[in-house]
Image (cartoon, grey):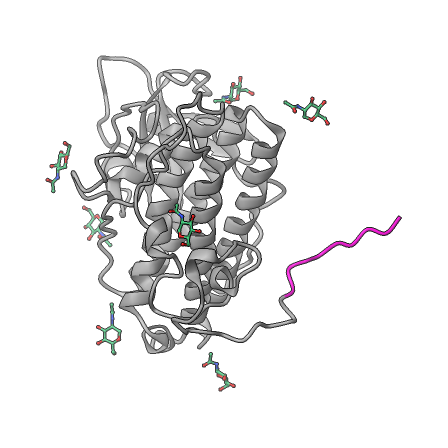
Amino acid sequence: MHILLTLAATALALPTIDKTSINKAAAVPGESSLFTTYAGKRTPLASNYTVAIPATDPGPPEADDILFQNLLAAEWGIYSFYQQGVEAFSAENFTSLGLPNSTYQRITEIRDNEAGHVRIFQDEITSASIKPGPCSYNYGFTSAAEYLALQVFLEVSSMAFLTGLVRQATTNDTRSALVAIGQVESRHNAWSLIDVYGVSPFSGPADTTYPYPNHILELTTLFLTNNSCPSLNPVYPNPKPNLPWTEFVRNGTTAAPGADIQIDGKDYYAVYFHGVNNISVPFDEFDPKSGVIIVVIADEEGAPTEESPSELTLLI
Ligand SMILES: *[C@@H]1O[C@H](CO)[C@@H](O)[C@H](O)[C@H]1NC(C)=O
Ligand SMILES: *[C@@H]1O[C@H](CO)[C@@H](O)[C@H](O)[C@H]1NC(C)=O
Ligand SMILES: *[C@@H]1O[C@H](CO)[C@@H](O)[C@H](O)[C@H]1NC(C)=O
Ligand SMILES: *[C@@H]1O[C@H](CO)[C@@H](O)[C@H](O)[C@H]1NC(C)=O
Ligand SMILES: *[C@@H]1O[C@H](CO)[C@@H](O)[C@H](O)[C@H]1NC(C)=O
Ligand SMILES: *[C@@H]1O[C@H](CO)[C@@H](O)[C@H](O)[C@H]1NC(C)=O
Ligand SMILES: *[C@@H]1O[C@H](CO)[C@@H](O)[C@H](O)[C@H]1NC(C)=O
């Protein structure tokens, strides 16, 4: 028996092409350079895929359609972040910070991968369900340095919700697809840690699993422009946890030790999810370290139920 294993052929660099003659509508993720090495500023996506696509089949929906609708809605935000970066910057914006001259190229390649994820998730949603379209996203970056910090946050969030979504999957194909996508997000993060931040790309023996992915998905709505989603789009995330959260805390000040978060006289815990475990610290002993941290503030140690987190805080 012959087994032919195809690995990502990084050594066989495909030529970078930015020609309108590429048939974007027919491009298949994994087969077309549009989703790997396309260097153009314009989106790799054909215009009939950058809209909400109505259901065409009376149904019933497949069991994992809602999972992929959530994932596609999240992916539009992530893809848009990179598309905005490709449009806003050129190589000099990064080389002027002393970064490698490949930095801009890598961002376009990640944009291509994320566009491929959009197409993969659209295809995973059956024709009995709506395929959500893109909204407007405001990431608020004003410089290349801020952009690169947000990039790490988005990739870390992606890994946390992808590992969590595995728990909602009903088919083995879905579970495997989620792991495969998570590995690519992890490569994007590893690239940044090595080339941009010049630090070790390793996070330890396991990346972080967070069992309540809809919480992280809800956190991504921070970047959504109000009322900008196509009217056809289903609620996102579905179901919506409606978790209160502290604002996007770049400076850690609202959750700093000694900050007053006494709510209804209860004891609160900062619950860190790290690797496959979690660690609870009484809130008044909470000492945020630098880096990108997502902490759950819960009224029970270990945040053992989906409802126990009272709040999700993002510290950058
Ligand atoms: C997009 O256009 C291509 C080429 O015309 C077609 O094959 C494909 O089915 C279209 N997809 C959607 C979702 O309309
Ligand atoms: C980066 O710089 C090297 C050495 O100066 C050069 O050979 C290479 O073509 C540059 N790459 C890009 C993408 O500009
Ligand atoms: C990128 O660099 C150009 C040229 O130096 C500059 O005009 C532009 O404002 C920079 N873009 C951003 C988003 O910082
Ligand atoms: C998933 O794979 C396992 C192991 O091959 C198999 O036993 C199980 O039936 C599969 N589950 C589904 C839902 O297909
Ligand atoms: C967007 O909506 C939220 C929640 O309804 C509201 O708190 C916020 O002020 C709105 N933002 C803008 C810019 O209108
Ligand atoms: C962080 O917050 C402190 C206290 O409010 C403030 O003095 C400091 O300037 C802030 N630092 C940054 C980088 O925003
Ligand atoms: C956190 O860890 C504790 C102890 O292992 C466990 O009981 C709890 O279920 C974990 N919390 C979550 C949300 O997985």
Where residue 161 sits: x, y (%)?
Answer: 45, 35
- Whether residue 126 appears in this view of the structure is yes
- Whether residue 291 appears in this view of the structure is no
Where residue 158 sits: x, y (%)?
Answer: 44, 43
Identity of the residue drawn at 25% across and 40% down: 222
Indicate left or right for 279 with 141 as reference: right
Identity of the residue drawn at 58% across and 44% down: 180
Q: Is residue 203 above or below residue 281?
A: below
Closer to the camera in the image, 227 or 248: 227
Indicate left or right for 216 with 251 as reference: right
Q: Which residues are magenta?
A: 1-9
Where residue 258 sits: x, y (%)?
Answer: 26, 32
Where residue 307 sits: x, y (%)?
Answer: 36, 16
Identity of the residue drawn at 63% across and 42% down: 205
Q: Based on the picture, tell me whether residue 229 belongs to the magenta stretch.
A: no
Identity of the residue drawn at 32% across and 16% down: 267
- Main secondary-structure element of the magenta-colored stretch: loop
Toward the top, the furthest residue is: 265
Q: Is residue 198 above or below residue 51?
A: below
Closer to the camera in the image, 102 or 110: 110
Q: Is residue 307 above or below residue 46?
A: above
Image label count? 0
Query: Image quarter for residue 96?
Result: bottom left
Indicate left or right for 279 with 171 as reference: left
Query: Image quarter for residue 200?
Result: bottom right
